[in-house]
Image: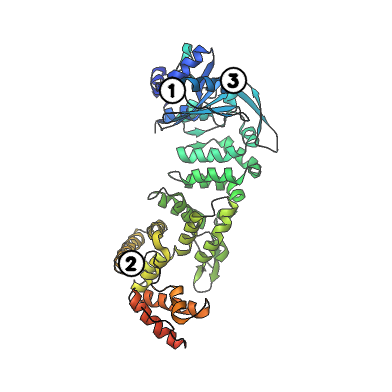
Amino acid sequence: MQTNPQAHDTKSLLQKISAPIFKILADTAQQTNTEIYVIGGFVRDIYLERPSKDIDVVVLGNGIAFAEKVGQKLKTNVAVFKNFGTAMLKHADLEVEFVGARKESYRADSRKPIVENGTLEDDQLRRDFTINALAISLNKDNCGDVVDPFNGLEDLENKLIRTPLDPVVTFSDDPLRMMRAIRFATQLDFKIDEAAIEAIKSQKERIKIVSKERISDELNKIILAKKPSIGFNYLFDTGLLELIFPQMAKLYGVDIVKGRAHKDNFYHTLQVLDNICETTDDLWLRWAAILHDIAKPVTKRFEEGHGWTFHGHEDKGARMVPQIFSQLKLPLNEKMKFVQKLVLLHLRPIVLAQDKITDSAVRRLLFEAGEDIEALMLLCNADVTTKNEYKIKKYRNNFELVKQKLKDVEERDQLRNWQPPISGNDIMQTFGLTAGKEVGLLKNAIREAILEGDIQNSYDEAFGFMLKKAEELGLKAVKQND
């Protein structure tokens, strides 16, 4: 990643802003005698050599009026947000947002600023971090010049997240910036300035005025980074994690009884999360990694002669998932059910890998995991965090055996997303029953017989088995198989 500010002089910056949209912006500025600058993330990403499709333009004057002039030239619609004093248009694959230069002040009970017209420096001063306050002139006399009043280029070179203002003021004014500081540090693999760390610790309670949706949006961006543990360590060390996601913070710590300790489940979880990030970009599979051991603190017991146990943590954890998703305003839909399923089943392949692999155990796992079996296997592989190379090799070899067995049984028995060949409706029609206990008993018996391999997964064998089982229950068929 390029972070050397000397690598970009005015000439090379002009090349970076040579797309047609920039010429139109510059021409409109000259024709309307308006001073404008590209500012923020687009400028930062030029230096970091990261692709960016969002261009922020600060206008010394009326940003909306200037945007409408540009929209007329481009013959494109301009979306105006009068409450925010901003306007936005799309051109090619770029999104351009315009705002008049302004200064802001805040009330203690709100993230919503009181806005006044301001200078370019006022506008840069209101930005969250020095690396996001960089501006490039699009004006005729100094086009391509960088305006950097807070040494943002130096912070880019030093890989440092720092605030233009006193960080206590910055984070108190808009507490979401604490999450953003951690998110940028995670995404860019930067350090957070020590003064900013201390400010987050002192202002952490202010996060309570931020909506859960905004917090979760930043949290998800941290989770989607290449190495999310960077962000979660910052969240934990500053005290924010305990406020926004207390169940995860409770994973931290090691208890010792009679010289026997368990592993620190917080750092184990972070390792599992980082591990799974090497194989998938799926946000919800990453959430499954975060939550797979979430119930260990409430199921932890010390058993004499055995040591620490966490019996049932997979079942308890699965039952905690909806509550956590609701608390964090995450979607309570199929995404949540996917995470819940993986938390519930995450020990099953590990148990299979340790024991003799039977066809019936594999059938049950395929039946319960369905289309999510590959995701489950990725999670289980990521869950191997031992430093013992022999154990790692043993587990991974065993997992390969399990995967092959899964493949073999699936090809033979077709049990993925399987429904038994005899339905509850078939049972009711055959025996003249209404929905009730007998129907459930017969359905379960058929399913178990197929999963155990006692009968083939076919209608004829299942029907014959059902008639025999019904006879044991004292039921007689009123409708025979056609």
Coordinates of residue 38 in the picture (x, y in percent): 49, 23
Could you tell me how far apart the alpha carbons at marks 3 and 2 are, in whole angstroms?
Answer: 65 Å
Residue bearing mark 1? 21
Residue bearing mark 2? 414
Going from N to C along the chain, the mark reached first, 1 or 3, is 1
Residue bearing mark 3? 62
Depth check: 175 or 199 in front? 175
**Which of the image's four quarters has the C terminus?**
bottom left
Q: Amino acid at mark 2?
A: Gln
Q: Amino acid at mark 3?
A: Asn
Coordinates of residue 362 in the picture (x, y in percent): 36, 69
Going from N to C along the chain, the mark reached first, 2 or 1, is 1
User: Is residue 260 visible from the viewing direction of this image?
Assistant: no
Any mark on residue 264, and which? none
Q: Amino acid at mark 1?
A: Ile
> Pointer 1: residues within 10 angstroms few (<14), some, or many (20+)?
some
Q: Are marks 1 and 3 in contact (CB under 8 Å)?
A: no
